[in-house]
Image (tube, rainbow, N blue to C red):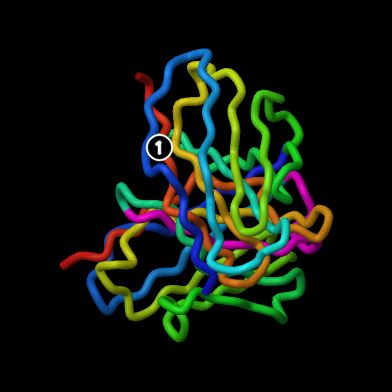
Amino acid sequence: DIQMTQSPSSLSASVGDRVTMTCRASQSIGSYLNWYQQKPGKAPKVLIYAASSLQSGVPSRFSGSASGTDFTLTISSLQPEDFATYYCQQSDTMPYTFGQGTKLEIK
Amino acid sequence: EVQLVESGGGLVQPGGSLRLSCTASGFTLSTYWMTWVRQAPGKGLEWVANINQRGSEKYYVDSVKGRFTISRDNAKNSLYLQMNSLRAEDTAVYYCARDRTVFGVVLMDYWGQGTLVTVSS
């Protein structure tokens, strides 16, 4: 199975900050990479698909990029509602594995 | 409005069985792959299984192969997960999700609210 490794596991930041988190795949997955946001007690919500495409309805402060097997999610200016856990997921090869998550907390 | 509603969770003893259901509305179930994802308490997301539109292709994560069976009844707008030989490590919230393919990439664009399965004696 393809292993997805996210870093950091947790991150503290303030409203207005620019935040970046990373996901690394254990083998090449092309652009078959999605990012999800999950708030406590809620189902995940897709933010970015195909590494850099913004899901409809998601604010433009969210962006994604890719370089080889490394993928990055950037939030350009943190808003209070962005504090949550973020997961990457590969959809290149089944099982479609998730990373372990990055928890974004308020500083 | 697209909605997915899971049901069937509960407390079951180790070695027992449970059948989860996911009822879909607001879209035509028969035109989408569907997926089950689970989340153990305080842990991350784990992709469990998916099924194609006709139910002729099914894929599972290794940890549930031979114990879980995904199925669907498009006429009833329903997705199912039959779970047998349950173990403590199967304790989790189980979500159903709709798969959508864009630019060849599969993403889960709608999720249910989840149903909790607790395996304990």
> Residue at 26% of width from left, 65% of height from top?
B119
Q: Secondary structure at mark 1?
A: strand
- Chain for mark 1? A
Determine the residue positioned at 61% across, 49% down: A71
Outermost residue, bottom side: B66
Residue B62's spot in the image, x, y percent?
Answer: 46, 79
Q: Is residue A36 above or below residue B93?
A: above
Q: Residue furthest front?
A: A67
Question: Residue B46 location, x and y as percent?
Answer: 46, 60
Q: Which residue occupies the foreground of this view, A60 or A72?
A: A72
Residue furthest right as drawn: B103
Crowd rating for badge 1 (residues with CA inside 10 Å; few <14, some 14–19, many 20+):
many
Q: Amino acid at mark 1?
A: Lys
Looking at this rendering, what residue extends furthest in the top direction?
A16
Q: Nearer the viewer, residue B83 or A75?
A: A75
Question: Which stretch appears magenta?
Answer: B26-40
Q: Relative to residue B81, is residue B57 depicted above or below? A: below
Image quarter of residue A35:
top right
Q: How many marks?
A: 1
Task: Name the residue beneath numbered marker 1.
Answer: A103
Determine the image quadrant of residue B87. Answer: bottom left
* Residue B1 locus on image (x, y percent): 73, 37
Q: Is residue A52 depicted above or below B120 in this figure?
A: above
Residue at point 54%, 62% (across, down): B36
Left/right of residue B100 with respect to residue B48 in the rendered view: right
A68 sits left or right of B53 in the view: left
Q: In which quadrant is the C terminus of chain B drawn?
A: bottom left
Image x and y of residue B75, in percent: 74, 65
Does residue B36 appear left or right of residue B31 in this picture? left
Q: Is residue B94 magenta?
A: no
Q: Nearer the viewer, residue B59 or A103?
A: A103
